[in-house]
Amino acid sequence: MSAETTASTNERFARPSRIRIALAVVFGLFYAYDVWEVIESVAQIIGLGLGFTPVGWAIMVIAVLAPFACFAAAYVVGRRRSAWFAVLAYLAGLGVSAALFFSLTVLLGASGAVVV
């Protein structure tokens, strides 16, 4: 492989393509929905006149930050691979984000972190 071919290949991977940007935006909307879901849950609990203990607030903060972390991990894993692999990474991240949300919701109820 010549130096020119290697340089053009490195330049191609250095810039995100339009497909990669589109994938990040589309899947970013799904991850943003996960964040909104957590914020909506907090608003509903507070709207019912209930509150959180400090442990409950810590659980909810982790639940809000988890989709951001999952998106970042999926982006990093899929950024230098094919577009199909990036799609699979984003889907796996969404699955992990959903599983974390459900697990943290159960933990919130089991720990008695919601108070009247």
Image: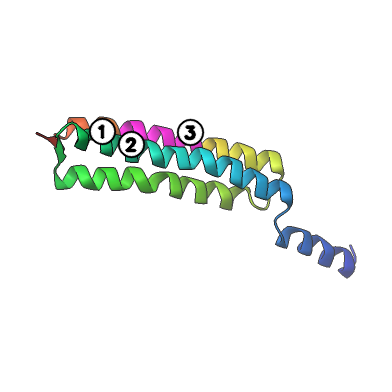
Q: Which mark is residue 40?
A: 2
Q: Is residue 42 left or right of residue 49?
A: right
Marks 3 & 1, CB-CB < 8 Å contact: no
Tell me where residue 29 appears, x and y as whole percent: 53, 41
* Amino acid type, mark 2: Glu
Helix, strand or loop for disc 1: helix
Marks 2 & 1, CB-CB < 8 Å contact: yes
Examine the image and state in which quarter residue 48 appears: top left
Between disc 3 and disc 2, whose residue precedes? 2
Q: Is residue 33 left or right of residue 65?
A: right
Residue 96 lies in the magenta-colored region: yes
* Amino acid type, mark 1: Gln
Q: Which residue bears the numbered disc 3?
A: 95
Examine the image and state in which quarter residue 104 appears: top left
Tell me where residue 49 appears, x and y as whole percent: 14, 34
Query: What is the quadrant of the C terminus in the image?
Result: top left
